[in-house]
Image (cartoon, rainbow, N blue to C red):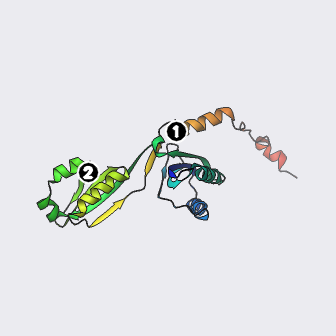
Amino acid sequence: MEKQEYNITVYTENQIGLLNRIAIIFSRRKLNIESLNTSPSEVNGIHRFNIVITETEEVVRKVARQLEKQIEVLKVYYNTNADVIWQEMALYKVPTDVIAEQVSVERLLREHGARAVVIRNDYTVFEATGHREETDKLVEVLQQYGLIEFVRSARVAIIKASDGFHSKLKEFEQREPGDEVVENQYLNNRDKVFTM
């Protein structure tokens, strides 16, 4: 089987120490996490991890099963890049004097879908959002003009064919409704129950 990039989406309760246990699952298998993002999900109180690794589907399937064994993990999905819509955000810091003198800044921003977020006398910061190849291309261009600093965010991804986790929860509740709440039968007879 051929290795390719997979996006692993993990829906979890928000618990201290869970990130560490998830990381251990990858490190024990000697798998490199290329990108890791965690954020609240569309369901209140439930968080979503987006983890990117390059592996075979068989390995990814095993990791997904192991992740689902964690008590706080509600559901794990894995998808190829073709099955998700994804973006990364990048910031670039360049010297203002060089960029202003040597570059048609407006054209540069338009060509790379970037925008200026900070302009100071000593430096200018650009922001661009896109796939890694797109943000890397702007790094190459700005290196010529004294790129001072560059940082890229972790990937955020949405599964194309998903109705969202909220609908899955509703579906589950309809299939397997919880027990009806039973009032404590002794609540109104407190004096009778607790007297000796």
Few, some or many residues within 10 Å of mark 2 (<14, 14–19, 20+): many
Q: Which mark is residue 164?
A: 1
Image coords of residue 76 (percent x, y): 58, 47
Q: Which residue is most to the left?
A: 101
- Residue 165, placed above or below residue 152: above
Image coords of residue 65 (percent x, y): 64, 50
First along the sequence among labels 1 and 2: 2
**Residue drawn where x is 24% and y is 60% of the image:** 142
**Amino acid type, callout 2:** Ala
- Is 145 positioned to the left or the right of 27 in the image? left
Q: Which is closer to the viewer, label 1 or label 2?
A: 2
Q: Which residue is nearer to you in this view: 162 or 3?
A: 3
The secondary element bearing badge 2 is classed as strand
Image coords of residue 51 (percent x, y): 50, 54
Few, some or many residues within 10 Å of mark 1 (<14, 14–19, 20+): some
**Residue drawn where x is 37% and y is 53% of the image:** 132
- Is 106 positioned to the left or the right of 167 in the image? left
Q: Which mark is residue 88?
A: none
- Image quadrant where residue 182 sits: top right
The secondary element bearing badge 1 is classed as loop
- Is 157 positioned to the left or the right of 138 in the image? right
Image coords of residue 31 (percent x, y): 55, 61
Q: Which residue is most to the front?
A: 1
Query: Residue at label 2?
Result: 114
The Cα–Cα distance between marks 1 and 2, rounded to whole angstroms, is: 30 Å
Q: Which residue is nearer to you in this view: 22 or 2?
A: 2
- Residue 79, placed above or below residue 145: above
**Residue drawn where x is 29% and y is 66% of the image:** 149
Q: Which residue is nearer to you in this view: 182 or 109?
A: 109
Q: Are marks 1 and 2 in contact (CB under 8 Å)?
A: no
**Amino acid type, callout 1:** Gly
